C-alpha cells in the first residue's frame, strides 16, 4: 500500500478487480465439484486437535439437523469437557465412552482387547443405523496402531459401509491401510506444544 | 503375538509389565508439568479442521462451565452448521459473525478493512471481558495474512493480554510474528482432500 489517498484508491481498485477475476475462477472450479456422499475422514498426526476437530464437526452437523454418534475408544471413566457437555445435553448426540483408559493405565492387554472388541461391535451398529448421519470413532487409530483390533477386519467393514453418512476416525499413528481407503485425511502437526514449556494439560484445551 | 494360549499369556504378561514401567515414567513427566495459565493457541496450515477444532475446544470448555466467545472474521451472512448450532443454543456461548465474506466475494478492499477493524475492536472487548474464559477468533489469520489488519498492532495487544483465559486464532497462513508469541501451535496438513476427487463442500464437514 502507498502513501496518498489517490494511490490507495488505485491499489484498492486493482485489488477489487483481481478479486473479481478470482471469484470467476473459483466459481468454475466449484462447478466441477459436484459429488456428494458420506465421507470417510481420518484425523491423525502428533499435533493437538484431532478429537476436538471431530467434536467441532459434530457441532456443525447438529446445526444442520443431522444425528451424530460419538464413541470414545480410549478415554475411560475420567471427567472430560466433552463428556460433561454431551451428558448435560443428551438430546444433542449419542455419546458413549467404551475405553478403559490408556494401555499404560490399564496394564492389562486381555482387558484392552476385550474393551476394543466391544467398542468395535458397537461402532458397527452405529455405522449401520440408518438414523445416524455422522459417526465419530474417537482414538480408534490408537487401538489399531497397537493391534488391539485387527486392521484388516476394520478396513473390510469400512469398505462396505453405507455411503449415506460421514465417519470420522481420530488418533495418532493411523494405519496406511486406513489412509488408503479414506476420503479426507488431515495430519495434525505439532509446531509448538505447551507441554514442552512445562504446562499441565488444561481444561477446555486438552480435555 | 504367538500361537498358543500359554505364549499369548506370556506376551500379555510382558506387555502388562512394560505398561507399568511406562505409567511410572509418565507420572514423573507429568509431575514436571505444573504451569497453568491462559494459552495463546494458533491453528494454521492448508488442511481441514482448523475452525472445527476450535469449536470442539469450545464444547470442552462449555462442558467445564467456562464462558466461551466466538467471533468469525471471514464468514458472512451465509448459513453454516456452527452458526445454526450456536443460534439454536444461544445460552451456550457468545457467537458473532462480523465478516463480510471472502475477499473474492466482497471485491471491496475498503469494506474488508472496515469490517476487520470492527471485528478486531470487538475481539479486544472479548479478550478484556473478565467474564469470558475462552475467546476464539476464527479466520483472523486470513485477515492478517492479507494485511487487512496490521500484525504489529495485534501482536502488541496479545502480548499484554490477560493470562486468565485461552485465546484461539485460526486460519491458514499464520504470520511468523504470531507463531513467535503463541503457546500452542498446530499445523493442519492436507494429506487427502475430497475436493481433489470432485466432491463438493459438505454440510457438517466443511461448514
Image: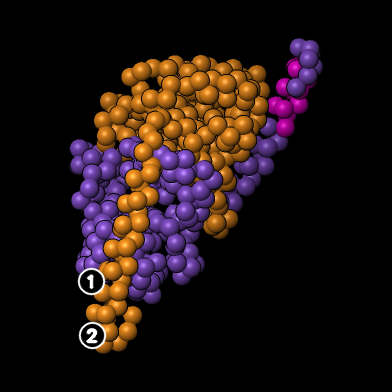
Chain colours: A orange, B purple
Tell me the residue at 52%/43% (across/down): B192
Residue identified by numbered label 2: A6
Q: Nearer the viewer, mark 2 or mark 1?
A: 2
The reply to whether label 2 and label 1 mark residues of one chain is: no
- Write down the chain letter for disc 2: A
The answer, for residue A205, to whether it is visible in the render is no
Q: Is residue B116 magenta?
A: no
Camera-side residue of A97 and B204 = B204
**Majority SS type along the magenta span:** helix
Tell me the residue at 22%/48% (across/down): B78
Q: Secondary structure at mark 2?
A: helix
On-image quarter of the C terminus of chain B = top left
Residue identified by numbered label 1: B110
Question: Measured from the top left, where is residue B111 in percent x and y?
Answer: 21, 67
Which numbered circle lies on residue B182?
A: none
**Residue B126 position (above or below residue B3):** below
On-image quarter of the N terminus of chain B = top right
Question: Measured from the top left, where is residue A22 in percent x and y?
Answer: 34, 61
Q: Secondary structure at mark 1?
A: helix
Q: Which residues are magenta?
A: B8-18
The answer, for residue A109, to whether it is visible in the render is yes
Decide if residue B164 is on the left or right side of residue B190.
left
Tell me the residue at 54%/57% (across/down): A192
Question: Measured from the top left, where is residue A193 in percent x and y?
Answer: 53, 54
**Residue A29 position (above or below residue B183):** above
Camera-side residue of B21 and B95 = B95
Q: Is residue B9 magenta?
A: yes
- Cβ atoms under marks 2 and 1 closer than 8 Å: no
Camera-side residue of B29 and A124 = A124
Amino acid at each position: 500500500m502507498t502513501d496518498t489517498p489517490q494511490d490507495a484508491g488505485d491499489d484498492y481498485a486493482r485489488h477489487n478487480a483481481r478479486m473479481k477475476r478470482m471469484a470467476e475462477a473459483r466459481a468454475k472450479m466449484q462447478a466441477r465439484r459436484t459429488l456428494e456422499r458420506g465421507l470417510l475422514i481420518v484425523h491423525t498426526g502428533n499435533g493437538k486437535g484431532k478429537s476436538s476437530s471431530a467434536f467441532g464437526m459434530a457441532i456443525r452437523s447438529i446445526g444442520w439437523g443431522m444425528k451424530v454418534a460419538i464413541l470414545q475408544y480410549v478415554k475411560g471413566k475420567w471427567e472430560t469437557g466433552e463428556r460433561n457437555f454431551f451428558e448435560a445435553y443428551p438430546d444433542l448426540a449419542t455419546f458413549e465412552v467404551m475405553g478403559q483408559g490408556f494401555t499404560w493405565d490399564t496394564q492389562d492387554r486381555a482387558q484392552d482387547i476385550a474393551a476394543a472388541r466391544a467398542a468395535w461391535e458397537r461402532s458397527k451398529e452405529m455405522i449401520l443405523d440408518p438414523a445416524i448421519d455422522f459417526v465419530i470413532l474417537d482414538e480408534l487409530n490408537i487401538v489399531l496402531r497397537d493391534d488391539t483390533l485387527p486392521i484388516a477386519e476394520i478396513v473390510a467393514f469400512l469398505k462396505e459401509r453405507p455411503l449415506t453418512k460421514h465417519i470420522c476416525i481420530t488418533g495418532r499413528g493411523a494405519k496406511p491401510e486406513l489412509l488408503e481407503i479414506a476420503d479426507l485425511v488431515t495430519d495434525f502437526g505439532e509446531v509448538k506444544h505447551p507441554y514442552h514449556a512445562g504446562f499441565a494439560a488444561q481444561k477446555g484445551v486438552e480435555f
